[in-house]
Image (spheres, rainbow, N blue to C red):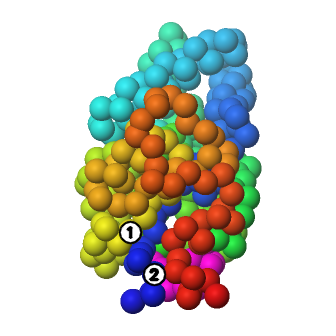
Amino acid sequence: MTGSRYDAVTFDFWNTLVWEEAGHLRGLRAEAWAGLLEEAGFATERSLLDAVFDRAWERYVHHWTSNQQYQSVQAAEEILEQLGFPVPMHVRRELIDVYTGVGRQATLHLTQGIEACLRTLKGAGLRLGIICDVGMTPSDQLREHLDARGLLELFDHWSFSDEVGHYKPSPVIFEHALGGLGGVDPARAAHVGDIRRTDIAGARAMGMTAVRYTGISDDQSQPEPEGHHVVADYAELPGLLLDEAIRN
């Protein structure tokens, strides 16, 4: 027992633990594809690449909102089909590898104050987890970024959509997280994330305490549901989740 009313806290990944400069990953993919295609003898307008990349993202969003898996390999294969010209098999393989693997070269940033917050919660005896909807960057690469910064070891369990097979707000991915954290009672768990439709709605439906983090992105896509707590600074979070006896 931690002495707190909580036994565990789960965190979203994007714009909660980690953020990227707008368009950074997409730009890396587009530049790499343009270079590989040019080397292979295909003069490809950047506007064409932008258009087919946009369509792939739209398909991802459609699948994401309907809880149907759409992963980076599938996106890359569909983009290739929409280029309008045949690409040799060896070039296709290179393009797919770059599209799915470029996350390893990306410059990602930790959200301000997250390391101190995680260490405080961990030091108080809470179990920590990740519940992440994966986009075009596979979960193994996301974990590598946390590991390189010494944070992965702070988490007791993680639930990434490309491994669980469900996106938030599906109860399946939340159940996977709570089960992996030792069968935590939802009433004794909190979830921190930035998106109302996925993080806040999913946590509330599970009976968890929902915390909406606005330090990177203040989701205005829909007015409800709102978190039980809204924080813009991670310095506030331990004070919300831990008893005075633990904090002092």
- Name the image quarter holding the C terminus: bottom right
Disc 2 crowd rating (10 Å Cα; few below 14, some 14-19, many 20+) is some
* Disc 1 versus disc 2: nearer the observer: 2
Residue 186 lies in what quarter of the image? Answer: bottom left
> In the structure shown, which secondary structural element does the residue marked by tag 1 occupy?
strand
Report if residue 120 lies within the magenta region. yes
Report if residue 51 lies within the magenta region. no
- Whether residue 112 sits left or right of residue 120 in the image: it is right
**Residue 93, percent from left and from top:** 51, 37
Disc 2 marks which amino acid? Answer: Ser
**Residue 13, percent from left and from top:** 54, 54
Q: Foreground residue, 148 or 230?
A: 230
**Magenta stretch in the rendered image:** 118-127
Q: Which residue does the numbered mark 1 point to in the structure image? A: 189
> In the structure shown, which secondary structural element does the residue marked by tag 2 occupy?
loop
Give the tally of numbered discs.
Answer: 2
Disc 1 crowd rating (10 Å Cα; few below 14, some 14-19, many 20+) is many
Residue, x 55% and y 36% (percent of image)?
Answer: 219
Q: Which residue does the numbered mark 2 point to in the structure image? A: 4
188 versus 159 height, above or below: below
Labels 1 & 2 near each other (Cβ < 8 A): no
**Residue 59, percent from left and from top:** 41, 24
> Quick one: label 1 or label 2, which is nearer the N terminus?
2
142 versus 147 height, above or below: above
- Whether residue 24 sits left or right of residue 231 in the image: it is right
Residue, x 56% and y 88% (percent of image)?
Answer: 245
Q: Is residue 49 visible?
A: yes
Q: Is residue 165 visible?
A: no
